[in-house]
Image (cartoon, rainbow, N blue to C red):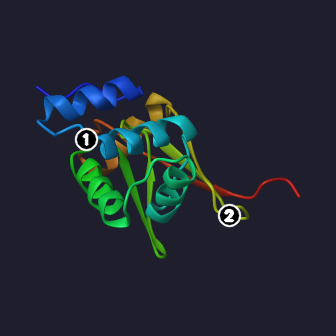
Amino acid sequence: MGVKPIRSLEDALNCCQVKGMRLSRQRRFILELLWQFKEHLSAREIYDRLNQAGKAIGHTSVYQNLEALSREGIIECIERSDGCLYGHSSSSHSHVNCLDTQQILDIQVELPLEIIQAVEQRTGVKISDYRIDFYGYRDP
């Protein structure tokens, strides 16, 4: 039996408990921040935002907690050439990569059944899930 999809901060906190992860003050701060902003942030940005908000937390603690949360599938980790970005949503979703602002936006996209079936026929693999990466520019 899999863990149900994480669709809220409460789901993320519950998932930590189900997986036997201690819900430390720092871990809670990180999850609250990611769900509040719903952006993809680097560890440095998370550290800076928490400290600016008066929530003193060390660099090492931020990195260790992000690693543990992403390893357990509670938050998303996107690996980029300049380091990892962390996002609140670990449930299945797609991304729009904005090439001029470097933003990554979450989007729920459902492909038409014909496309799924075509992929299955070409590969012989029964598709159970998918994520799509879109790339583009904002209007000038």
Return the residue at label 1: 24
Q: Position of residue 134 (x, y in %)?
A: 58, 52
Residue 62, placed above or below residue 87 = below
Which residue occupies the foreground of this view, 66 or 101? 66
Amino acid type, mark 2: Leu
Q: Quadrant of residue 88?
A: top left
User: Can residue 103 be seen?
Assistant: yes
Image-based side of 90 in relation to 2, left or right: right
Amino acid type of the residue that numbered disc 1 sits on in the rendered structure: Ser
Query: Within 10 angstroms of label 1, few (less than 14), some, or many (20 or more) residues?
Result: few
Q: CA distance from mark 1 to mark 2?
A: 36 Å
Question: Going 11% across and 36% down the picture, which residue do you hit?
Answer: 20
Quadrant into which the C terminus falls? bottom right
x then y, percent, for residue 70? 29, 51
Q: Which of these two is toward me, 132 or 36?
A: 36
Q: Which residue is mark 2?
A: 99
Q: Secondary structure at mark 2?
A: loop
Residue shown at the point (68%, 64%) measured from the top left: 99
